[in-house]
Image (spheres, rainbow, N blue to C red):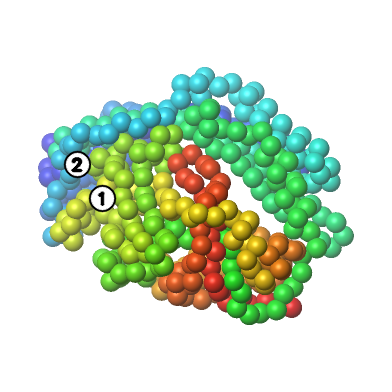
Amino acid sequence: MAAGAEFAQVNASRGRGFSVSLEKGAIETSQQRESSGVSLKAYYRGGVGTTSVNALDWERIEEAARAATALAKQSDPDPDFAALPDPEPLPEVEGLFDERIAGLATSQVIQWALAATDEALAAVPEAIISGGASFSVGDSALATSTGVRVCTPHSGLGCYIRAVVRRGDSVGTWFEHSYGRTIDDFRPEGIGKVAAEGALEYLDARDIPSGDYPLVLGPQAGDSIYYAIAGQANAEDVQRKRSYLIGKRGQAIAPAILTITDDPLIPRGMSSSRCDSDGVPRRPLTIVEDGVLLTYLHNAYTAHKAGEANTGHAAGDGIGPTNVNVRLGSRPAKELIAEIEDGLYLASGGPSPDGTTGDFSTTVDFGFKIEKGEIAYPIRNAALGGSFLEFLQGLDAISSDYRDEPGVRMPTMRFRSVRLAGSG
C-alpha cells in the first residue's frame, strides 16, 4: 500500500512433508521437503500485479511488494473490479489439522508403503506394484488491505497402490488408495490386496460391438458426473462464454433424482476449509436441486460483475468446488445392475465433457460388460461419446450404498443409454 496500490492481498505459507515412491515392489525414491513462500497481489484501478517469493525473507518480500504494485499500475484498468472483500466472521471446521501427523516418523510412512506392497504380492505374487505414501503438515496465512486476517494449519497423509498383472498377452491393472486429514480417517490396511485382486479382474478383456448401451458408473466413475457439473457451474467460465451451462440456471439439466451439494464445512473433509482464497467465509451450497441448476459458483470478482451474491468459491486465481456430494437413492448398487440385461459397467473414468461444448469422448479403460444382470467380463478397445447434457437426461437411478472418503460419499449411478464405439 505504501508503494501506491489501491488494494493488496498477501498469502504466506510454510510446510514440511515426506514421501516415498514405489516401483516394481521396491522403494524407488524417498524425499523429505520443507517449503515456505509468499505470494503478493497489488491492485490499481482494477489492474492487478502478481509476484511471489519462495522464502520468508523480509527484504525480498518488500521488493516483491513494490514490483507487484508497479505491475498493477502498468496493467490495463478493469472496470469490473470493485474491491477486495471486507472481513467477516469465519466458521469453525473440525479436523483440518492433526497434531499426530506432525509427529510422524518417516519410518512409519515407509512402513505403510511396504506393508501395502506385501499385501498385494501375498494376494497375487506375480503382480507388478507401484505407488507410494506421504504426509504433509503446514500452515498458511492470508492478509488483505481491507482487513482480512486468516491463519489456518493443515495436515494430510495418503497411500496409493497400483497393480499390474500380465498373463500371456493379457494385461490387467487396478489401483486403490486411502487419504485423510487426520490419522483416524487414514486406513491403508487392505489397499494392496484390493489393487492386486482388482487387476486380476481385468485380464482376458474382450472386444464388444458398437451400439447404445445402458451404463452403470461405479463410485469412482460416478464422481466424474457431479464434479463435471460443479466444475462448470463456474461463474468465470459462464461470463467468458466458455461453459456448456451458460443460460441453464433455473432450468432442469437432469432428472429430478439428481441433487448436488457443495459443502466445505464437513469435518475432516479433504476439501474443507474456513474460507476461500479471497478470505470469504465458506458455506454449504446446493448447486442442483431436483435436477434444476440453481446457481453458479462465484468469487468476489465474478459476484460483483454479475451483481449477485458471492458463494465463497475463490480457488487461487480462479473458481472451484469443494466437497461435492449427490443425494443418495433408495436401492443398493447390486439391484441397479441386476435390472440390466445387456449393458456396461465402468469402475473408473466416467464421461469427461469438454468444458465449453459439453461433448465428451472417453476411452473405456476400466469397463465391464453386463449380461443378464451380472458383471460378466472386462472390455477393451472401446470409447464412450456424445453430448453430456443429453446423456444426463438418461440418469434413472442413484444407489443407496456408496464409497466413503473424507468429505464425500460416492454412490453408483445408472443411465439409460450411452453411445459406445467398440471393435467387436
Secondary structure under tag 2 reads: strand
In the displayed structure, 209 sits above or below 302; it is: below
In the displayed structure, 109 sits above or below 125; it is: above
Residue at position x 57%, y 36% from top? 158
Badge 1 density bin: few <14, some 14–19, many ≥20, Cα 10 Å: many
Secondary structure under tag 1 reads: loop
Residue holding disc 1: 311
Viewer-nearest of labels 2 and 1?
1
Q: Quadrant of residue 221?
A: bottom right
CA gap between label 2 and label 1 equals 21 Å
Instruction: Tell how many labels.
Output: 2
- Residue type at mark 2? Ala
Residue 351 x %, y % = 53, 66
In the displayed structure, 246 sits above or below 212; it is: above
Q: In which quarter of the image is residue 177?
A: top right
Q: Nearer the viewer, residue 70 or 273?
A: 273
Left or right? Give the position of 49 relative to 227.
Answer: left
Residue holding disc 2: 8
Residue at position x 42%, y 29% from top? 95
Q: In which quarter of the image is residue 129?
A: top right
- Residue type at mark 1? Thr
Q: Which of 64 and 222 is in front in this view?
A: 222
**Do the CB atoms of the residues marked 2 and 1 lie less than 8 Å apart?**
no
Q: Quadrant of the C terminus?
A: bottom right
- Evaluate whether residue 29 shows in this view: no
Residue at position x 12%, y 45% from top? 6
Q: Which of marks 2 and 1 is nearer the N terminus?
A: 2
Residue at position x 70%, y 79% from top? 209
Q: Nearer the viewer, residue 45 or 347?
A: 347
Residue 258 x %, y % = 42, 60
Left or right? Give the position of 180 relative to 75.
Answer: right
- Evaluate whether residue 181 shows in this view: yes
